Image (tube, coloured by chain):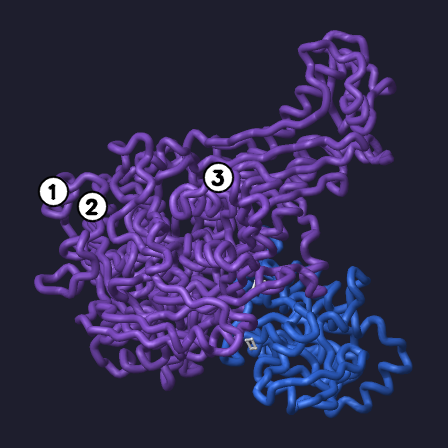
Amino acid sequence: MDLSLNVNGRPEQFAAEPNELLVERLRDGLGLTGTKVGCDTGQCGTCVVQLDGRSVKSCLVLTASAAGSRVTTIEGVTTRGGELSGLQEALRQEHGTQCGFCTPGMVMALGELVENTADREAPTEPEIREWLTGNLCRCTGYHSVVRGVQRACSAARTEIPEEISGAAAVSAPGGPGPEPASVPASASASGQEV
Amino acid sequence: MTAVTGEAPLQGSGLLGQPLDAREDPQLLRGEAVYVGDINLPGTAHMAILGSPVAHAKILSIETKAAEQMPGVLKVATAADFTDVMPLPCIWIPGGVESHFPPHPYGLPGARPVLTGDAVRHVGDPIAVVVAETPRQAAAALAAIAVEYEPLPVVTRADAALAEGAPQLHEAVPGNLNAYWTCGDKDRTEAALAEAEVKVELDLVNQRTINSPIEPRGAVGDYNAATDEYTLYASTQGPHNHRFLLAALVLGIPFNKLRVIAPTVGGSFGTKGYLYPDMALVLLLSKALRRPVKWVDTRTGLMNSTVQGRDHRQHVVLAGTRDGRMTGLWATSYANLGAYPSTIGPGVATALMGRSISGMYDIPAAFCEVYAAFTNTVSLGAQRGSGRAEAAFLMERLVDRFAAEIGMDPAAVRRKNLVPNEKFPYDNGLGWTYDSGDYQVNFDKAMALSGYADMAARKAEARTRGKRLGVGIATYVAICGVGPSTRMSQEGMLGGTWESANIRVNPTGEVTVTVGSASTGQSHHTVFAQVAADELEIDPALVQVYEGDTLKAPYGQGTYGSRSYSMAAPAVALTARKIKAKLVKAGAVFLGVPEEKVVYAGGKVYEEGNEENAKTFADLAMAMWYGWGLPHEIEPALDETTHFDPPDFNYPFGTHVAVVEVDELTGETEVVAYTAVDDAGNIGNPKIVLGQIEGSITHGLGQALMEAAVYDEQGLLLSSDLTTYALPRAADVPFFTLGKTTTPTPHNALGAKGAGEIATVPPAAAVVNAVVDALSDLGVQHIDMPLTPEKVWRRLRGEAQ
Ligand code: FES
Ligand code: FES
């Protein structure tokens, strides 16, 4: 069947089998190999992309069911060799990646969390860990990733100009005032000594 | 041209020990790193493997005609197509290979063929392959291959496989016994046990686990008919090793006709150092089809084919005195090797475990015996912390049993028995000689950092919340830096285990480092650059590191046993010293002063006392490239190589403390605090090591709490994907409290001990000790891993193990 998708801002038209998975279209059809496949069962999160702004596991989405949608893959987050996003930079500083196989999926899944914290209190450590439960990492044990998110969120908040953050605080349901993130990334980091 | 040398004087060791950012990270974060699955050569065909659906059967017939006619299918192959291909060698033969010189290439009887033709011996055993135009076509055609089986009885446990009348796996291996291996002093240990004031015993199951790197394995074979050369791209942690094994021992082709390239590798933890049928198959089929052939595993495929780990059933005994001195240690272990001897699995199950069992303790008599048996399960191999984790588990469980038996604090018992400083180098009586250590300092630091003294109060507080708080200690010594080649040959390793590095100084002053090692996520490009820059006292930005391609890198054995920084990095440092020595010689010529007067410092060469008149690194690089004015005894250019074969292993160690809370109602175990004090000698890049320690502990917690490869009676792997095999997720672990001590090893130029996997060694023991502590008032003395809520809940209700 003939389908179209908007991928990283580019319209794509192609013919697809009805049972084709979105991840296959992205990797094999469009050559966007930044999205990874780590499992057969929707457990690992290496294939996470954003579909109309929400992070989804692209191994669980039929291409046909995504027809007409806006897809953002890791290739759409930064230009090739380009400057890192705030989240990527924070993960780099905390060395939130080792083999890197889980990393694109992590970045795609965490993007939603980090972006949304611009207008509310920074997520707590348990919230970050909860958010990460859809992504498996065997190398880092997640600690550096969690620290990276903490860093990214506190950076995101300190970058918000006074008046905007004031307005944001109003719209955050039950959110306390726009205090800077209470826990600087380094303070709760484990293992300063190593 | 660069003008970097000189400005910021980097004082030799100044750069090591600094947490430089990993230069690999930006491209990983942008999704730009190329893994084997991302390699698409023009004209690539795709391979799929038919694995056995049953665990044990004779193959009566294989019918491939229908599959050959499926759309897109280019070739279907079975064992009959590869009769001239040798089986996959096992190169670690327990007990030594003194009788083999030149070394016997084929390893053990029972070796796995590239495809099995006579019988299948585990679920997933490869029977046939299909190559087709697309991966989907290849996978679809597998279903059209008809195999007729005659079922055979199945055995999945090592002890059962050795029993009278057990199903037999290999004609060449009567009784399924691959090796009966021992170490230590049997008579003395028997005597110590007989005379003991106190004796405690445990029956332990160190369950089989699956490493589960997040990237499944893959391979691309590319045969070039014009040159008769093969290229293999594979997710490997030892490209040179795989080249050697494949060319010399499997395909029987000249070494220089095979190039192996490890692209970015998505984690390994031991599993990707093994030789698998697919690596040979993609090459053979690429030659047959004159097209590149690509294969990428699925998760379920990985679970049913990539080596699995641990899997010992043990009876262990500890003897001691009423006042807490340990006097004798005995371990009998049944190790499950799976269906075929993997590349080095038999050595992991024997020597790597057995010689390590006494850990940090000075025990006068110790003995270990291992029965390594074949069963109808996936082959056994290494697994992060392999062998040493199994050893630490049995020892540390025993210490707690012993402490409980004599009514002494487990920390006090441990402290009393640590190897004292004056005994280093310490012969543990089991075959290892520990290089260096200050175990008391390490232990005390862990006790202090964990707040061990306050645990009673914390237990009482937890009870008010319906939680049972338990604390568990585990110490360990992790033999690393594998290893001295001669020593390893005595262990039965067929092959040298040295490591090499080359440094080439380019005419414009940049430095190219190539190493035989290959990263699976350890940021080698960052760390080796750091080492070279540190020695040469230049800006690390000038240093570029290459590895993972046998055509470009010097020989080396690869990344395993936490040896990259304690084997390859010293090779880099030694090579840099050769460069410096040459620059001093040449500098004497260029400066016109006697060699003894020449100083190399801050990346410059000058006459002692006359630093103004220095030749910079860049000056010298260019001058050596030109070679003008050099006397005949000094060769032009700067290009040096070192093959580093250490005098002995190195022995990192440490103490971990787990604090858990067990929920009275649900049996759920939560790790609420975890303290680790590890000693890896001198550390190069603490940021990288921190990540490895944290990941390693998490991996160890996984074994304690949730991971298990479960086979049913028919030999079907029930935990064959990530819905049925539990890996720790982010919410399963807290931040850890980490500390370190530093005792350099005398066995390499950097004083570096292994680090990458060492922290995987003790967590399982620490957590089980903690949970048993939490349940001890119920009379619980041991619980087998994994400590699932159901298992703990039953024990809370007084049910037996
Ligand atoms: S590949 Fe999609 S969740 Fe694992
Ligand atoms: S960095 Fe290797 S799996 Fe996450």
In which quadrant of this rendering is ligand 1 seen?
bottom right
Marks 2, 3 in one chain: yes
**Residue bearing mark 1:** B191
Q: Are marks 3 and 1 in contact (CB under 8 Å)?
A: no
The amino acid sitting under disc 2 is Gly
Alpha carbons under labels 2 and 3: distance apart: 49 Å
Residue B246 placement (x, y as % from top left)? 43, 47
* Quadrant in which residue A92 is drawn: bottom right
Marks 3, 1 in one chain: yes
**Residue bearing mark 3:** B255
N-terminal-most mark, 3 or 1: 1
Q: Are marks 1 and 2 in contact (CB under 8 Å)?
A: yes
**Residue A57 to residue B446: above or below:** below
**Residue bearing mark 2:** B328
Residue at x 25%, y 69% (from the top left corner): B59
Q: Does the rendering let one see residue A186?
A: no
Q: Tell which of B96 and A69 is nearer to you.
A: A69
Q: Tell which of A3 and B661 is nearer to you.
A: A3
Residue B786 placement (x, y as % from top left)? 35, 71
